[in-house]
Image: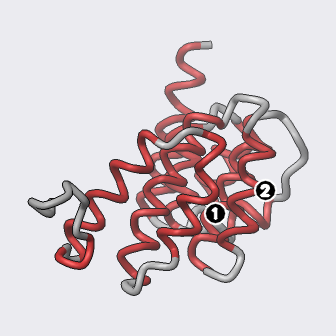
Amino acid sequence: MNGLNGAYDRSAEDEHQRFARYLHELTVVRDEDEADLVTRILRDPDATMAQSAIVRHVDRRAAQLLIHDGFTAWSRVMAEICAEREFLARRLNEWTLLRSITAGEPWGSEEVTTGSDWFQRKAVETLPSPAVLSLLAEAGRTRRVRADASRRLRQRYRRH
């Protein structure tokens, strides 16, 4: 804070302080202001830090909206903003695939088996789909994904 006028002196912040501030701003932003805030953060000179803050936000918001009607419109806006950033674009695409599977919409085996390690772990953790779990139990990218998918399938069949 500047003692004279109470204005926030952003030039004195390091990337850790900006990161913390960005995370806070992203948790309290109004829906109608979200796109502008994300765009502003992605203009930060420390591109890696900015992208890290945005991916946390994307993961939090996508998880909140996954089963709600607002997911599709939200993901389109975020995809447009993040289109030039490969990692963020991929993460949004993978959230969209999770949404499609959750909503019972068509999905392809190849999309699931070529998904990132993050996507496959998230799918095993969150999706109730026996078809996806079976696919990942057999063709998951890592031993952990295959084992966790197999375990979830066994648990599912014990309950039924």
| Residue at the right extreme of this rendering | 106
x and y, in percent, of residue 13 in the image: 20, 73
Query: Of 28 and 117, which appears nearest the observer?
Result: 28
Please name which of the two marks, 2 or 1, marks the residue nearer to the observer: 2
x and y, in percent, of residue 11 in the image: 24, 78
Instruction: Specify the amino acid type for callout 1.
Output: Ala
Residue in the image at 33% along x and 48% along y: 24
Q: Quadrant of the N terminus?
A: bottom left
* Callout 1 crowding tier (Cα within 10 Å): few <14, some 14–19, many ≥20: some
The total number of labels drawn is: 2
Q: Secondary structure at mark 1?
A: helix
Residue corresponding to mark 2: 76
| Residue at the left extreme of this rendering | 3
Residue corresponding to mark 1: 139
The image quadrant of residue 20 is: bottom left
* 66 up-or-down from 73: above or below: above
Report the Cα–Cα distance between label 2 and label 1.
30 Å
Residue in the image at 20% along x and 58% along y: 5
* Residue 150 visible in image: no
* Callout 2 crowding tier (Cα within 10 Å): few <14, some 14–19, many ≥20: some
Residue in the image at 67% along x and 59% along y: 94
Would you say 77 lies left or right of 86 here? right
Q: Secondary structure at mark 2?
A: helix
Residue in the image at 20% along x and 66% along y: 17
Q: Earlier in the sequence, mark 2 or mark 1?
A: 2
* 139 up-or-down from 75: above or below: below
Would you say 126 lies left or right of 23 here? right
